[in-house]
Amino acid sequence: MKFMVIVKASRDTEAGVTPSTELLAAMGKFNEEMVKAGVMQAGEGLHPTSKGARVKYAGGQSTVSRGPFSLTGDLVCGFWLIETKSLDEAIDWMKRAPFDGGSEIEIRQVFAAEDFGEALTPELRERGERLRAQVGRK
């Protein structure tokens, strides 16, 4: 099972405060443990929303809003993409993450092709597999 682990933004991350050397070292060690265990597929930190934008779609139109955005519970400052046998295993890994001081993460399962049932036709499945293979070669 594949999961996206969403790291929630804070006042510090939105202010552009970068992690300390100690936290970077602890995070590097944690990431290395997940890689060695075959769990971690990707993981990155994100710049504050002041360097980002949102695109909203309605009625065939799109509108763009540039950051910064108000600090709410839905802002993201980083993520991991991990693969585990279950949600419980994903939780066990994330309980070991070197966070402190009110940090919060959210763990969400990523859809797999079989989750879409008959709506994912053989042609659409093959197209998706071809695109994933192309992305993997870059």
Image (spheres, helix red, strand yellow):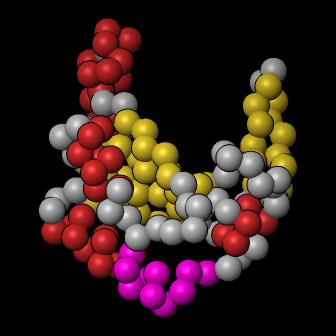
Whether 56 is among the magenta residues is no
Question: Percent position (x, y) of residue 36?
Answer: 16, 68
- Quarter the C terminus occupies: bottom left
Among the 4 quarters of the image, the one containing residue 12 = bottom right
Which residue is at a point 15% across and 62% down the rendered structure image? Answer: 37
Please tell me whether residue 3 is drawn above or below residue 82 in the rendered image. Answer: above
- The image position of residue 35, as x and y in percent, is 22, 67
**Which quarter of the image is occupied by the N terminus?**
top left
Is 39 situated above or below 28? above
From this view, report whether residue 23 is shown above or below residue 125.
Answer: below
Identity of the residue furthest to the left in this view: 37
Name the quadrant containing residue 18.
bottom right
Classify residue 48 as left or right of residue 127. Answer: right
On the image, the x and y values in percent for residue 101 come to: 57, 68
Q: Which residue is at a point 54% across and 55% down the rendered structure image?
A: 104
Q: Is residue 20 above or below residue 41?
A: below
Identity of the residue drawn at 81% across and 30% down: 61
- Residue 40, how many percent across, how many down? 28, 59
Total residue callouts: 0
> Which stretch is magenta?
18-27
Overall secondary structure of the magenta section: helix
| Image-based side of 107 in relation to 17, left or right | left
Instruction: Mark yes or no: residue 113 visible.
Output: yes
